[in-house]
Image: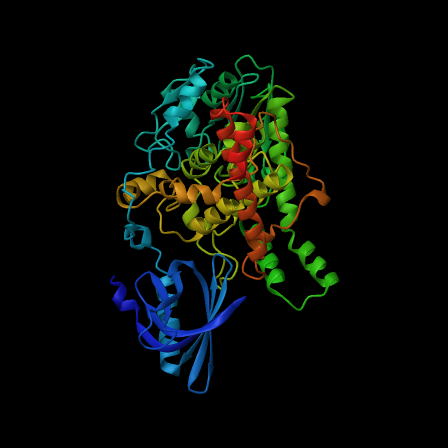
Amino acid sequence: MEFAELIKTSRVESVVLAGAGLPPARGTLCITSHHLLLSSRPGGAGAAATVELWLLIRNVDAVEKRLCGSSGTITLRCKDLRVLQLEIPGMEECLNVASSIEALSSVDSLMMMYPFFYRPQGLRLEDGWHLFPLERFFQCIAAQTNQWRLSAVNKDFSTCPTYPPALIVPAAVDDGALRKAARFRHGGRFPVLSYYHRKNGTVMLRSGQPLTGPNRKRCPEDELLLAAALAQAARGFVVDTRSLQAAKQARMGGGGTEPKSAYPRWKRLHRPLERGRPLQESFVRLVDACNDASLSMDRWLSRLESSRWLSHVKAALSTACLAAQCLEREEACVLVHGAEGTDTTLLVTALAQLILDPSCRTLAGFQGLLEREWIQAGHPFHVRCARSAYSHARLKQEAPLFLLFLDCVWQLGRQFPRSLEFGERLLLALFDSAYASSYGTFLGNNEKERCLCKVKESTHCLWAWLDQPAQRREFLNPLYSPNALVIWPSVEPQSIQLWQGLFLRWIRSSEYLDEAWAEMRRLVEKEAARAEWDTRSPALPAAGIQAEKER
């Protein structure tokens, strides 16, 4: 397929761009294989063109067109929740532009996406891809205990197509037993180590549901694996992210739960978390409410409640707190799974680590957590983030699980403003990148797909861009002070707030907030520079120090 075949009109003059909070701009609209550009030429023909719009077409979630006489208006609803309007002279041009954008935004082939064509200056293709190898994470665990080993049982993805090649498993269980345990778990996702709690040696595991079925089948190797994971711990908890009723229904379809008779030292706890259609519809209802400027206060509060989004945030944080409490306070091991083990399971394990482990709250630690618990762990970004809140297409596998995670992280940052090294801007950048990006980090559904498409050899890594000094400075939290304590978030209804920085990002101006944030950073950096100068100049007389500071 050639992109040129999808572009019916590549250039249109005198197009007017409008959007919430933006002054109308008239200019030339150009459509390329991956971008929509609009450039104006203010101040006469001799002045330089000003780019008013540079939109990645993959970011377009829905295209709506309205014809009026000989012209038309195209409304672009974007995956990052922006809403843009293009007034296009000429009915035929309007229809052609709309058709071109719809066709280009619907291209689903991984290797035809923009990251495979993007080549920024100053970055090499290999940069960033090997910053967070599992081997380094394992070395930290191996320094504490010899109860775990790094297994290459999945090196060719034959044991589990959605797991990475390297996995951390109990040292007492050999690869043959792992293969048999994989056949007993949904999608081959047998229990693997997610987190080692250094304080007391307990661990958190994740997996897919056991395939016990209606006949309550058993697997000795799976039972051995979970017994070995407990080691010296007296007991463990299985945190099942499905309701008890859903788990029973799954058993009739071949899935199920761990029976107490086969796993006597494990106690099952059901904490249902929505995924799939209910979560996607909740997201859509919330965005609709945020975009409705005509709502009265009562009506707004009613729409916010009926969306149930904040209830999903509360449930996710509550379940993560439960898993963290089992490790920290009960000194028990934890196994987290739902059905497939690729959605709510990862949501809980990643949040629990943020709550427990201060190293995950640094910028580098958080990137490593995302790489380990979301990307390499097999969250299907390609299908979950195929559509955002505006798409008119029938829902298939879309679900904003990653957005829900980012919202929960924002809640943690709001409740503990000095405990996260990164700020809201990083979370917004991650949301944008998950849905439409110039980088290959979130492409595909699992490591196997990324290997087959040579993503790491052919695209740039998001982490390399984030770690550039200028970008890093933008994403850091100026108030950060390392906190070695566990951060227990409040999950009371009064404590959970709407993430305005995301859901109202394009509706209200953030100019004054941005100015306040920049001033805060300036003051903190000034104070840090002053403190550093003081430590380097102990011999200066007091009067001299004061004079130097005043300069």
Q: Is residue 271 left or right of residue 87?
A: right
Q: Where residue 487 appears, x then y in whole percent?
A: 62, 31
Q: In the displayed structure, would residue 228 be above or below residue 447?
A: above
**Closest to the observer: 60 or 263?**
60
Visible in this render: residue 337? no
Residue at the outermost bottom position: 69
Q: Position of residue 415 (x, y in %)?
A: 64, 39
Looking at the image, the residue that sits furthest to the right is 298
Locate residue 155: give its quadrant.
top left
Does 425 sit left or right of 411 as displayed? left
Q: Is residue 188 visible?
A: yes
- In x, y percent, where is residue 6? 30, 67
The percent coordinates of residue 108 (x first, y second) are 35, 56
* Quadrant of the drawing holding the N terminus: bottom left
Looking at the image, which residue is at 26% across and 68% down? 5
Q: Residue at x 42, y 86 (%)?
A: 70
Residue found 40% across the figure and 23% down from its top: 178
